[in-house]
Image: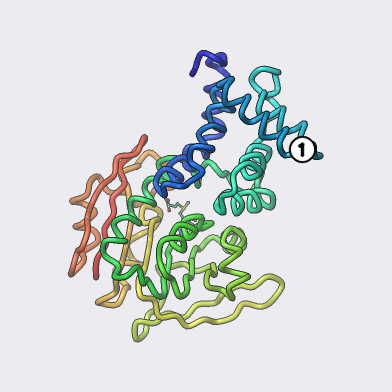
């Protein structure tokens, strides 16, 4: 396939838009009925496959001319008409969302329209390693959580919480609060999870909290929840599980402060080279020593392109 485009075009496009790899993982993993169509798109746009290009052009003819037709044809043929320089994340996501009726893509398209460019880097959230490690963790959780009833979920270091999308898709969740100490995160997270946040009355809600300073009382926590253009509101929440996939970014105080008997699912890694990682572990054994569970139901590791991820699930 690589014969159709000059190698530098393929490299440039695949490296620059590697969120498509995360999407590939997700569609493969969920055995999505549109996976074949997605692969056709990928082979046309990333590898210049002429048969797939023909298929996409015919699709556009079938849909009829719109104000976007010229842009879509430019995207389909970019490697042949020296248009690659004009490709952007926004244009590609919009085109993928136009061709594929996939909810995740629609959420991504709306979110990227709002925050893309300066604020978010979509590659950080949908790299192959990022998606693989989250789906792997969900597979293990699925074996442990009875009847997929997760109840109330408290996420620590939730960031922009693109991960919650997968959780809502796979589990029955009563309510999920996503806590991050960075005040820039909550609004962006709420918007990615707009369906559960706004349409479903805060079934998802993000807040600005330093999780190392959370105080527990009777297995319950209280924190302030910010609202757009309004004062914050205090919330009292009793979680059925605490999930933290950002352990490498914080000290272990959050873990030490958890009440005995709390179900926890955590991820950390051995990616010491990343400047933002202040608390990595060298291997799974070190992770198990650092985070001591009274009943450890799962401990495992996943090798990704740059580093190893470790997952622990159990009761503290
Ligand atoms: C950049 S994300 C990385 C996500 C993680 N590697 C993953 O894949 O899920 C880490 C987040 O942890 C947050 N964080 C770090 N220390 C924290 C703390 N004490 N309380 C709450 N959030 C914290 C940061 O603000 C950041 O948004």
Q: Does residue 49 sit above or below 280 in this rendering?
A: above
Q: Nearer the viewer, residue 87 or 278?
A: 87
Badge 1 residue CB within 8 Å of ligand 1: no
Q: In the displayed orientation, state which residue is furthest to the bottom.
A: 218
Query: Left of 220 or right of it: where is 61?
Result: right
Q: Is residue 207 visible?
A: no
Query: Left of 4 or right of it: where is 238?
Result: left
Q: In the displayed orientation, state which residue is furthest to the front.
A: 62
Tell me the residue that label 1 is attached to: 64
Q: How many marks?
A: 1
Query: Left of 109 or right of it: where is 213?
Result: left
Q: Does residue 49 sit above or below 144 in this rendering?
A: above
Q: Quadrant of residue 232?
A: bottom right
Q: Nearer the viewer, residue 227 or 17?
A: 17
Q: Quadrant of ligand 1?
A: bottom left
Q: Is residue 235 visible?
A: yes
Give the residue drawn at x 57%, y 33%.
41
Callout 1 crowding tier (Cα within 10 Å): few <14, some 14–19, many ≥20: few
Give the residue drawn at x 23%, y 46%.
283
Give the residue drawn at x 57%, y 44%.
121
Give the residue drawn at x 49%, y 43%.
23
Relative image position of residue 263 (x, y in whole percent): 29, 71
Mark 1 residue element: loop
Relative image position of residue 94 (x, y in whole percent): 67, 42
Relative image position of residue 177 (x, y in whole percent): 48, 70
Relative image position of residue 67 (x, y in whole percent): 81, 39
Quarter holding the C terminus is: bottom left
Q: Quadrant of residue 231?
A: bottom right
Q: How is the image coloured?
A: rainbow
């Amino acid at each position: 396939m690589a014969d159709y485009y000059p190698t530098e075009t393929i490299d440039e496009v695949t490296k620059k838009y590697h969120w498509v790899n995360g999407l590939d993982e997700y569609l493969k993993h969920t055995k999505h009925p549109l996976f074949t169509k997605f692969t056709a798109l990928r082979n046309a746009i990333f590898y210049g496959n002429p048969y797939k290009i023909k298929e996409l052009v015919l699709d556009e003819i079938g849909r009829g001319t719109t104000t976007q037709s010229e842009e879509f044809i430019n995207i389909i043929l970019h490697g042949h008409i020296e248009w690659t320089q004009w490709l952007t994340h926004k244009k590609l996501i919009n085109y993928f969302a136009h061709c594929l009726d996939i909810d995740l893509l629609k959420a991504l398209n709306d979110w990227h329209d709002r925050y893309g460019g300066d604020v978010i880097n979509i590659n950080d959230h949908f790299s192959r390693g990022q998606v693989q490690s989250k789906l792997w963790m969900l597979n293990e959780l699925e074996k442990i959580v009875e009847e997929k009833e997760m109840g109330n979920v408290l996420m620590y270091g939730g960031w922009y919480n693109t991960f919650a999308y997968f959780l809502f898709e796979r589990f029955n969740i009563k309510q999920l609060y996503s806590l991050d100490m960075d005040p820039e995160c909550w609004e962006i997270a709420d918007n990615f999870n707009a369906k559960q946040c706004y349409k479903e009355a805060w079934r998802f809600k993000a807040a600005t909290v330093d999780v190392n300073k959370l105080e527990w009382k009777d297995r319950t926590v209280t924190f302030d929840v910010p609202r757009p253009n309004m004062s914050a509101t205090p919330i009292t929440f009793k979680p059925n599980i605490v999930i933290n996939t950002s352990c490498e970014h914080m000290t272990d105080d959050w873990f030490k402060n958890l009440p005995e008997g709390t179900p926890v699912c955590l991820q950390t890694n051995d990616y010491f080279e990343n400047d933002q990682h202040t608390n990595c572990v060298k291997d799974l054994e070190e992770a198990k020593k650092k985070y001591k569970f009274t009943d450890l139901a799962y401990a495992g590791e996943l090798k990704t392109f740059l580093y190893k991820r470790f997952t622990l699930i159990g009761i503290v």
